[in-house]
Image (cartoon, rainbow, N blue to C red):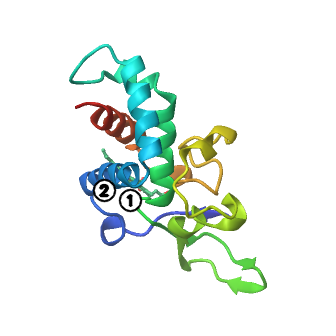
Amino acid sequence: MELVGAFPLGDFIPKAATTTFALLEWTMTELMRHPECMKKLKDEICSVSTHKLYVTEQEAEKMNYLYLVVKEALRLHPGVPIAPRQLSEDVKVHGYDIAAGTQVLIDIWAIQRDSLAWGPDAEEFRPERHLDMVVDFQGQNLKFFPFGSGRRQCPGSGYVVALVEVTLSSK
Ligand code: HEM
């Protein structure tokens, strides 16, 4: 099924700053709920960073566990939970005919918590699950695409991940 063209985004896509703060808050929430992850992350920050109060972007890039933590927070709490699209041609999906021009909503939130894709612990915050998965933020794998996929995917993803990583790991 080829999906092209988005709706006018205004009504659907929350503001960039809101989604970024939401990601920061959800990541901190999950770390408080999971002290073992918090400890692992603190150990990594102390072992990599040479500064006392802040972490540089170059240092954050070396923190592998930090990356897994942010990825897992984006899996469970995608700031933009649905991606709107309009069908460019008639398609049949699971026996249903859908006409060209139909507007559809792709439920990123539900897909990223689907136990068929993520296993029985899909609802659990477990950053280590991403160790076995070579899936980045580019929307190539449709079980993990917090920044959307294709031509209309989020142009702010690199900035957001760097910003959240540096903010989270600094005092
Ligand atoms: C955690 C933070 C963010 C999340 C989860 C997020 C997610 C998304 C998603 C899912 C889309 C729709 C993609 C699609 O339809 O395939 C989108 C679109 C967009 N995002 Fe973000 N975003 C975030 C932050 C930002 C930031 C910080 C900026 C700008 C600096 C930004 C700029 C945009 C723009 C301009 C679009 C529309 C792209 C287009 O329609 O061609 N986003 N974002």
Q: Position of residue 147 (x, y in %)?
A: 47, 52
Q: Which residue is mark 2?
A: 22
Amino acid type assigned to the residue bearing label 1 in the image: Gly
Whether residue 66 can be seen here: no
Q: Is mark 2 within 8 Å of ligand 1?
A: yes
Question: What residue appears at the point 63 percent right and 61 percent down from the top-left corner?
Answer: 121
- Judge by depth and name the residue closer to the eye, 68 or 16: 68
- Judge by depth and name the residue closer to the eye, 61 or 146: 61
Q: Residues within 10 Å of mark 2 (few under 14, many from 20)?
A: some
Q: Quadrant of residue 136?
A: top right
Q: Is mark 1 in CB contact (under 8 Å) with mark 2? A: yes
Q: Position of residue 131 (x, y in %)?
A: 64, 38
Query: Does residue 13 sit above or below 72 in this rendering?
Result: below
Q: Dot 1 lies on which element?
A: loop
Question: What residue appears at the point 30 percent right and 67 percent down from the top-left corner?
Answer: 10
Of the image marks 1 and 2, the number of the one nearer the N terminus: 2
Amino acid type assigned to the residue bearing label 2 in the image: Ala
> CA separation, marks 1 and 2?
7 Å
Question: What residue appears at the point 39 percent right and 48 percent down from the top-left corner?
Answer: 31
Query: Does residue 87 sit above or below 128 in this rendering?
Result: below
Whether residue 43 can be seen here: yes
Question: What residue appears at the point 37 percent right and 34 percent down from the top-left corner?
Answer: 162
**Label placed on residue 166:** none
Q: Is mark 1 within 8 Å of ligand 1?
A: yes
- Judge by depth and name the residue closer to the eye, 163 or 158: 163
Q: Which residue is mark 1?
A: 79
Rendered-image quadrant of the N terminus: bottom right
Q: Position of residue 84 (x, y in %)?
A: 48, 69
Q: Position of residue 145 (x, y in %)?
A: 55, 53
Farthest-out residue, top: 50
